[in-house]
Every structure is written in C-alpha cells, then in structure tokens.
Image: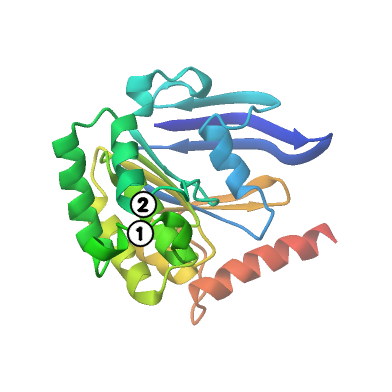
C-alpha cells in the first residue's frame, strides 16, 4: 500500500532524511520510532504529499503519492501532530464538515460521529456542542482522531496519537485500533509511547541519524533476555550513537 524507494529530503540545504527505503502492506500496523527530530513526521508528510522529496520514489495505494485522485484520497484517514482542527467550530460541526469532505451522506456522517463519540467521549452531547477552541489539548486530540476514522479508511496514518490523551482515553484508542486491524487495512503511526506501541504494532521502524536503520517485525525486535522493550530501544539508539562517535 505504501512504498518509499531511495527517498531523500533536505530543508534549506540541510539533509534530514537519506536513502529511505520502506515497503508497507495491508494487515500491518507499522510504527515509526525515533528521538525528537529524527524525521518521523517528515516521512509521514512525504507520504501524504505535504512535502516533496528531493529525490526518490513514493507510491501510495499503488499510485505515485503526488498523483492520487479524490477517490484514492478518500481511502486515507490522517491524524496530524498539529491536529489541524478548526477552533471556531463546535466539535459536532467540525466532524460533520469532515464527513462532507469525504462525500458522506448526512445520515451516514451523523451515525458514525455518534458511534465514535460514544466510544471516545464520556458526555458527547455536552462536549460536541462546545467550540473546539474551548477544548483541552486532549479533547482536541479525540476530535481529530474521530475525524481520521469517520470514513473507515483503508489507510490510517496517525502522528503521535497517544500524546496528550489521559490513560483511559489512550487505552480506549489501543483497543479500538486492535479491533480496527483487518486484512484490507494498513495502520501507519509514529509514537514515543513504547508501552502502547508494543501492544498494537506488527512491525517497527527506527529512524535515526537521517536513516531508517532498523525495519523489523515486532516479534523479531532485538529484545535481550530480561530486557524491556523500552530498554532495548534505548540500547539500539545509544549503541548507534557510540558507533558514530
């Protein structure tokens, strides 16, 4: 569903990604890991054609990433790190507008909004009537998550989905994503929360020093005996840093 071949990207002459090769298929939950500024969000933005690579090829849904038609784009759901919600609208109006962009009927959009809001919000009737600008960051995140899911996309791209969520909401999202996995869908996400990632991911990619230096199935992730997933991640990064020094 997604392919990156020899992709390079720089900003103002400074290289940020070099020779990125990645192939993602249906039925995967692929998580990009890395330190702050490693380039995870840049990779997602390249896939979404929000940035243009300096060189290399990107394909999404078996088409060049910069040549997707509206029908193909309607198969993609996106949660951006900056959320990109409209603060002047109520939660309900924003989600209704999102459904309209996906060409959903009013009845279908209302049904899906109600279903997702029942799941992610405790008092949806009150909370969705408020302007988004009055929400906490966590509340905005939940609205943005619902917007990404409203059209039941085949390709779901989530940038730091757990950041800002309280533990109950984060657990609900983990459960939802587990149930959302299917042979026809691909979930691609980035996150710093390794506890949630190891619960849902089928594959892991670590971005470090401009490159994708590890691309592994979750079951093949090099965790040593007695070592936690988090400790293994830190060991890999620190070993890479020591090697470079």
Q: Quadrant of the N terminus?
A: top left
Q: Earlier in the sequence, mark 1 or mark 2?
A: 2
Q: In which quadrant of the rendered view does residue 199 lie? A: bottom left
Q: Secondary structure at mark 2?
A: loop
- Report the quarter where the C terminus lies: bottom right
Which of the 4 quarters of the picture holds residue 110? Answer: top left
Residue 19 position in % (x across, y down): 67, 35
Q: Quick check: 34 above or below 238? A: above
Query: Residue 71 at what x, y percent from top left?
Result: 32, 21
Q: Residues within 10 Å of mark 2 (few under 14, many from 20)?
A: some
Q: Secondary structure at mark 1?
A: loop
Say whether residue 104 is visible: yes
- The residue located at (55%, 51%) in the rendering is 82
CB atoms of marks 1 and 2 within 8 Å: yes
Mark 1 to mark 2 CA distance (whole Å): 5 Å
- Out of 204 and 227, give the one closest to the viewer: 204
Q: Decide which of 144, 14 is in the foreground and name it.
A: 144
Find residue 90 and name its label.
2
Q: Residue 130 got which mark?
A: 1
State whether residue 18 is above or below residue 84. Answer: above
Task: Return the x and y of residue 86 as percentages of the image width and height.
Answer: 46, 46
Q: Residue at (57%, 75%) from the top-left corner?
A: 231
């Amino acid at each position: 569903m997604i392919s990156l071949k020899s992709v390079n990207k720089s900003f103002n002459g400074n290289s940020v990604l070099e020779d990125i090769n990645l192939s993602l298929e249906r039925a995967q939950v692929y998580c990009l890991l890395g330190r702050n500024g490693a380039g995870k969000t840049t990779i997602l933005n390249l896939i979404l054609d929000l940035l243009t690579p300096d060189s290399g090829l990107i394909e999404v849904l078996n088409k060049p990433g910069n040549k997707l038609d509206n029908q193909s784009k309607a198969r993609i759901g996106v949660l951006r790190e900056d959320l990109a919600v409209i603060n002047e609208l109520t939660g309900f109006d924003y989600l209704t507008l999102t459904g309209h962009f996906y060409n959903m009927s009013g009845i279908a959009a209302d049904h899906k909004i109600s279903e997702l809001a029942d799941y992610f919000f405790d008092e949806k009737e009150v909370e969705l009537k408020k302007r988004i600008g009055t929400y906490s960051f966590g509340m905005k995140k939940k609205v943005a998550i619902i917007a990404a899911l409203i059209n039941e996309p085949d390709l779901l791209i989530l940038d730091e989905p757990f950041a800002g969520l309280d533990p109950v909401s984060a657990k609900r999202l983990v459960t939802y994503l587990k149930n959302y996995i299917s042979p026809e869908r691909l979930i691609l996400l980035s996150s710093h929360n390794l506890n949630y990632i190891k619960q849902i991911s089928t594959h892991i990619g670590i971005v470090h020093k401009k490159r994708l230096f590890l691309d592994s199935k979750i079951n093949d992730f090099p965790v040593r005996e007695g070592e936690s997933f988090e400790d293994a991640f830190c060991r890999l990064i620190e070993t890479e840093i020591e090697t470079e020094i």
